Image (cartoon, rainbow, N blue to C red):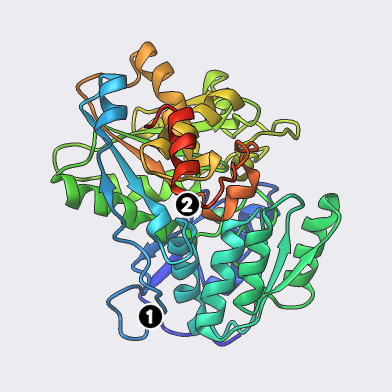
Amino acid sequence: MAKRATTWTLVCEGCGKRHAAFAATMGCPDCAARGVPTVLQVEGRLPGRGDAAALTLGEGDTPLVEVPRIAARLGLAGLRFKIEGANPTASYKDRYVAATLNAVRPFGVDRVVVSSTGNLGVSAAAYAAAAGLPCLFLAAAGLPNAALLQAQAHGAHVLMTDPERRQLLFEHAVLARGWFPIGLRMPRRVSNPFGVEGYRAIGEELVSALGRAPDAVLFPCARGNGLFGTWLGLRGARGGASRMIACQPASANSLEVSLREGRDMPVELPPSDSVAFSTRERVADPMALRAIRESGGCAASASDAEILAAQAELARAGLFVEASCALPLACLPRLLASGAVRRDDSVVCLLTASGIRWAEHLPPGSPVPTVDATPEALDRWLAGAGLA
Ligand SMILES: [Zn+2]
């Protein structure tokens, strides 16, 4: 592929060597040769919103809202929620996909592949459509039908396959067929260095909205790339940075276990199930572990019952989110009890995706009653429901 002059370069975390973008899509080749998979970081500034040639669908600048009822229940006056469902495809992944495509398109990338549990695949499909690129979406079993339909509407080629073989097909598409991977690099521990740069703006937006970094930021985490990228944007804010707190399902809490055991690299857990579908990841990213440690943060986890209760509480307060996004609220009582979050802290919970496309994952609702089309029938129903 052609090499172009850019305003950024990739630097290896492990050995400090600088790399051209396409020599390094699998992490640092020098460190890989020594058997150490490393993460590359962008140095400099990627093209983005505000650059004339940048691809954008208007991602970012999402609302930061207070929910007085929930704040009062927890006794936490400085509680706010950042509504990432307000992004163009209803999740924070739009920031990641836009940043990635803006970084790699100048190198002549002409097709993209994504392996996803839902939100990332839909986002990749939408931005590939905007860029006029073909998109191959290897879908995880069990993801909601609404995600498949939306991705197909954007023109993506959506394929289902044996869950155990999905990664193999993904690697074949990338290594043998030249499809550019929107998500992770191979081996699996190596993250896409561009996408996390897209999350930097979350931190910058928080500082801009509050006039300073919040005391604590609670992030629902699978690998923790969103937490890491947000920390990049909060680090060095005036008045001190935020404690980064990872919130994971109790059955997929790689970060919590790794911190408890004092590991340098995140622990890989056995496969598990959880209502928090998007966060059922076996192993977290080393960068997330680093961001938590360097920020003085921590990790917490919640049971499925706690996650569903938090999701329901948010919905009754007007915020409809995917179950994974209820993790911060589900973890808050435990964090308050342990002192990891204090009552006088300013706290931001990331609501990383809308619940709209995930409605079919909700527990069954109550049956919808039918009433005769007469005012008397409606009055009888209202009286019966105690609403007369
Ligand atoms: Zn290296």
Residue 246 visible in the current orientation: no
Q: Is 40 situated above or below 72? A: below
Q: Is 197 situated above or below 350? A: below
Q: Is residue 106 left or right of residue 252?
A: left
| Quarter of the figure that contains the C terminus | top left
Q: Nearer the viewer, mark 2 or mark 1?
A: 2
Q: Check disc 2 and report its element: helix, strand or loop.
A: loop
Q: CA distance from mark 2 to mark 1?
A: 25 Å
Which corner quadrant of the image does residue 86 belong to? bottom left
| Quarter of the figure that contains the N terminus | bottom right
Residue at 22% of width from left, 41% of height from top? Answer: 213
Marks 2 and 1 close (CB-CB < 8 Å): no
Number of numbered discs visible in the structure rendering? 2
**Camera-nearest residue between 254 and 62:** 62
> Circle 1 is placed at which residue position?
54
Residue at 62% of width from left, 57% of height from top? Answer: 184
Amino acid carrying mark 1 in the image: Ala
**Camera-nearest residue between 57 and 86:** 86
> Circle 2 is placed at which residue position?
354
Amino acid carrying mark 2 in the image: Ser
Mark 1 residue crowding within 10 angstroms, few (<14) / some (14–19) / many (20+): some
- Residue 3 percent location from the top left of the image: 52, 84
- Residue 238 percent location from the top left of the image: 14, 43
**Camera-nearest residue between 11 and 268:** 268
Residue at 77% of width from left, 56% of height from top? Answer: 167
Residue at 37% of width from left, 43% of height from top? Answer: 318
Which corner quadrant of the image does residue 316 belong to? top left
